[in-house]
Image (cartoon, grey):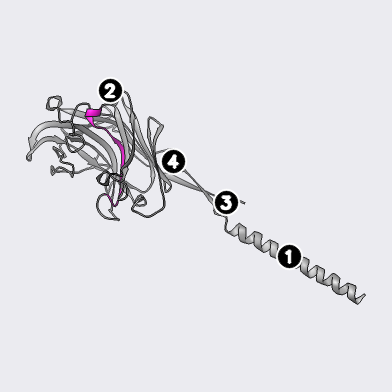
Amino acid sequence: MSTYFCIFTSFLILSCTACDSGESVQKKEKEYILPTITYSFSEEPVWADEFDYEGAPSSSKWGYDIGGSGWGNNELQYYTDDIKNASVANGLLTITAIKEEIEQNQYSSARLVTKDKGDWLYGRFEISAKLPEGVGTWPAIWMLPTDWAYGGWPQSGEIDIMEHVGYDQDVVHITVHTEAYNHSIGTQVGQSKRVAGVSTDFHTYRVDWTPEDIKGYIDDALVFNFPNEKEGYEKWPFNKRFHMLLNIAVGGNWGGAQGVDETIYPVSMEVDYVRVYELIETVEETE
């Protein structure tokens, strides 16, 4: 009896130990399961301008970059805050480039900015616009860092929602710039798409920006995807707040690469609306 009891007791102890060990492993495995994060965007804009007023662009939403120093690209225009270069009427914002001498520049235009009036970290950015036509025009809808946390261009990044150069009519470009990926070192990352009638019809230009990637769309069709490689700010400086810019440049290194047709001015970019939607993160715990 004594021998049998000892063997039976030992068996129970080993069995319980094995159970405890198995349960501990399961608990540890469960502890290291990461939650799944999905991203979506608010149904209603958190910031918008529908341009349902008259006169100058709303001062509560838009400021101006002013000057004519070439803007780093040997551009020919002087940016003003004059209503002749940026005005709102009939439900549209109109940015107009005019051939005129101003401050030793050959053209005037406008560059509207939301800095300190609309600054965002992540979100959906959608703009409906009709672009100017003609060799030498260079309209853009884009984003720059508000705080330049990683240094000057391109270290802190740039997001080009839409760029168009008039000598390549109906070809629209979506691009990002970082320290590791930019045209000055031959590593620029972007995509282009031919879109019929960009200067005769309104089209929607959109970027969805999340912690995981930046996706670019034209008329709701995916054109560009830039994933976060998670290898430092040199490749992904897009974890800081950015603001939006709308402008028409004249000439410059890219826009003027095939000259400037002086006979076409004035030319305009018309904007029907600008809408910004908030990023929504949903965390799902997995069993």
* Type of amino acid under label 1: Ala
In the picture, the disc for residue 285 is: 3
The residue that label 4 is drawn on is 42
Q: CA distance from mark 3 to mark 2?
A: 49 Å
> Tag 3, which secondary structure?
loop
* Residue 51 showing in the rendered view: yes
Q: Residue placed farthest to the front in the image?
A: 186
Location of residue 172 in the rendering, given as x and y in whole percent from the top left corner: 30, 31
Residue visible at 37% across and 52% down in the picture = 239
Residue visible at 85% across and 72% down in the picture = 7
In the picture, the disc for residue 88 is: none
The residue that label 1 is drawn on is 18
> Going from the N terminus, do you reach mark 1 or mark 2 first?
1
Q: CA distance from mark 2 to mark 4?
A: 31 Å
Residue visible at 31% across and 26% down in the picture = 202
Query: What is the crowding at mark 2: few (fewer than 14 residues within 10 Å), some, or many (at least 20)?
Result: few
> Going from the N terminus, do you reach mark 2 or mark 4 first?
4
Report which quarter residue 218 is drawn in: top left
The residue that label 2 is drawn on is 200
Is 21 situated left or right of 143 in this image?
Answer: right
